[in-house]
Image (spheres, rainbow, N blue to C red):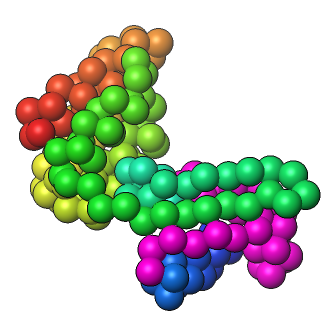
Amino acid sequence: MGISDVIAGFIQEALDDADGVLELQRGDLAQRFNCVPSQINYVMSTRFSPEHGYIVESRRGGGGYIRITRVQVDRQTLMMHVINSIGDTLDYPSARAILTNLAQSEALSVEVATALLTAVSEGALRTVPQEKRDALRADIVKQVLIHFV
């Protein structure tokens, strides 16, 4: 288990204990886990994003804090948020992360997420010029997700 998993697990437990709203000091967390503050930022952006059902507010500086709020959104709101967050391009690792998160949150079935990920893989898009793949991948993922809204 990596340091990011340990930090995420700690925050998750603290959120459970705090009934879904938690305020933390970035520096205190970094010191507790003997890591750099950017590692805390990484965990916040990858594990506690709106796609995962969290709102993260952050204020930097001496008295800076991170406030994490667990929110419950319906499936349609989550899907529309993801669709709107994709933008004009989508690389394969980001597509994999988005589809994995949607499957874990049960907004998409594992089968649909796996099939869509296969359809937008580098292998499936190998005949498309490299400079156009990410735009095509974004279009495909958005269109399929719109179908499931």
Residue 115 image position (x, y, % from top left): 16, 46
User: In the image, is residue 139 above or below residue 57?
Assistant: above
Residue 90 among magenta residues:
no
Q: Which of 31 and 132 is in front in this view?
A: 31
Does 34 sit left or right of 70 as displayed? Answer: right
Residue 134 image position (x, y, % from top left): 41, 22
Residue at x-position 67% and y-position 61%: 66
Does 36 sit left or right of 147 as displayed? Answer: right
Residue 98 image position (x, y, % from top left): 36, 46
User: In the image, is residue 98 above or below residue 69?
Assistant: above
Residue at x-position 78% and y-position 79%: 33
Q: Does the image show residue 45? A: yes
Residue at x-position 14% and y-position 57%: 109
User: In the picture, residue 120 is in which quadrant?
Assistant: top left
The magenta-colored residue range is: 19-46
Residue 42 among magenta residues:
yes
Does 135 sit left or right of 145 as displayed? Answer: right
User: In the image, is residue 91 above or below residue 135?
Assistant: below
Residue at x-position 87% and y-position 52%: 61
User: In the picture, residue 35 is in which quadrant?
Assistant: bottom right
Q: Residue furthest left?
A: 147
Q: Does the image show residue 1? A: no
